[in-house]
Amino acid sequence: MLIAQLSDLHVTDPGTLCLGRIETNRGAAAAVAHVMSLRPCPDLVVITGDLVNDGTPAQYRHLRTLLAPLAALPLRVIPGNHDDRAALVAAFADTDAVRADGDLLHYVEDGFPVRVLGLDTVVPGQPDGALCARRLGWLAERLAEAPGRPTVLLMHHPPVATGIGHMDAMRLNQGAQELGALVARHPNIERILCGHIHRAITSRWHGTVVTVCPSTAHAVALDLTAAAPARWTTEPAAILLHQWSAGTGLVSHFSPTGDYPARSFL
């Protein structure tokens, strides 16, 4: 099984730039083209939040246009702090990409060798994330349904500190400790796949591995000094590819979305 993970597209209105300077729409289009060029094709495409920048219906309409080439592939998305739940649900109402559990956008993808659980960590109006008792209860129930199956959790906000101070202030702040205890009781959780930080990051956490996907557009500057300022930078945009096999488990690859043609060693 091959999972392609995209994150933090930050799509804006057609013809506009994110923050007036960043070509996020072009980055999203390049990432989609990259996914469609992959051989073998992914079995599942997931987007871990911040699909658009301002949560407006117009931006979601443009997002649908940019994602149109993926129509033949299963696509599942979860919201990030830049997304608007109602507008996101409305934009994808004719697809299976978004699933709602009441007012929260959780989902279970059960049709593959690896079970995928999407978690909604959004707190409207706040940049940081939360897993309240209701959300943790939903996750506990889903994990109890298939305690022996390899499982991947998707969430926008990482539950771990990364050392980038201004982003760590906006991570999963509420419910991280409880989530850790729940994860520790379920060794079948192969990976927690996140976004939000705009960098590729990996960390061991409560017996599993947390993997953060870079943005399809701009990166958060890597500055591990205390009280580092919030800055962005242009680095090679990328997606992550997660390949599952029963004998090996989940192996993840950083896959840049630019033009990097392969050449023979001979």
Image (cartoon, rainbow, N blue to C red):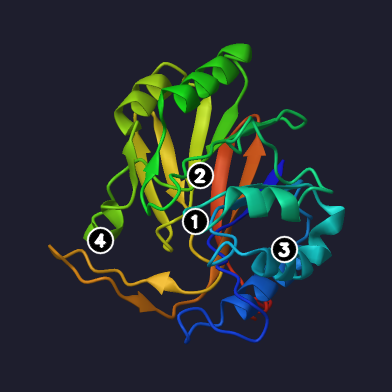
Q: Position of residue 203 (x, y in %)?
A: 35, 44
Give the vertical position of 113 relative to 257 (above or below).
above
Give the vertical position of 69 relative to 146 (above or below).
below
CB atoms of marks 2 and 3 within 8 Å: no
The span from disc 2 to disc 3 (Cα, nearest Å) is 18 Å
CB atoms of marks 2 and 4 within 8 Å: no
The span from disc 2 to disc 4 (Cα, nearest Å) is 20 Å
CB atoms of marks 4 and 1 within 8 Å: no
Foreground: disc 4 or disc 3: 4
The span from disc 1 to disc 2 (Cα, nearest Å) is 7 Å
> Image quadrant for the C terminus?
bottom right
Residue of label 1: 213
Residue of label 2: 193
Sort mark 3 into few (<14), some (14-19) or many (20+) by Cα contacts within 10 Å: many
Q: Position of residue 102 (x, y in %)?
A: 63, 30
Give whichever of discs 2 and 3 has the lower sequence position. Answer: 3
Q: Secondary structure at mark 4?
A: helix
What residue appears at the point 73 percent right and 51 percent down from the top-left corner? 90
Q: Secondary structure at mark 1?
A: loop
Q: Amino acid at mark 3?
A: Val
Q: Position of residue 194 (x, y in %)?
A: 48, 48
Q: Position of residue 244 (x, y in %)?
A: 64, 39
Front one among 65 and 143: 65
The span from disc 4 to disc 1 (Cα, nearest Å) is 18 Å
Foreground: disc 4 or disc 1: 4
What residue appears at the point 56 percent right and 49 percent down from the top-left corner? 79
The span from disc 3 to disc 1 (Cα, nearest Å) is 15 Å
Left or right: 27 as drawn, with respect to 175? right
Left or right: 203 as drawn, with respect to 223? right
CB atoms of marks 1 and 2 within 8 Å: yes
Q: Amino acid at mark 4?
A: His
Give whichever of discs 4 and 3 has the lower sequence position. Answer: 3
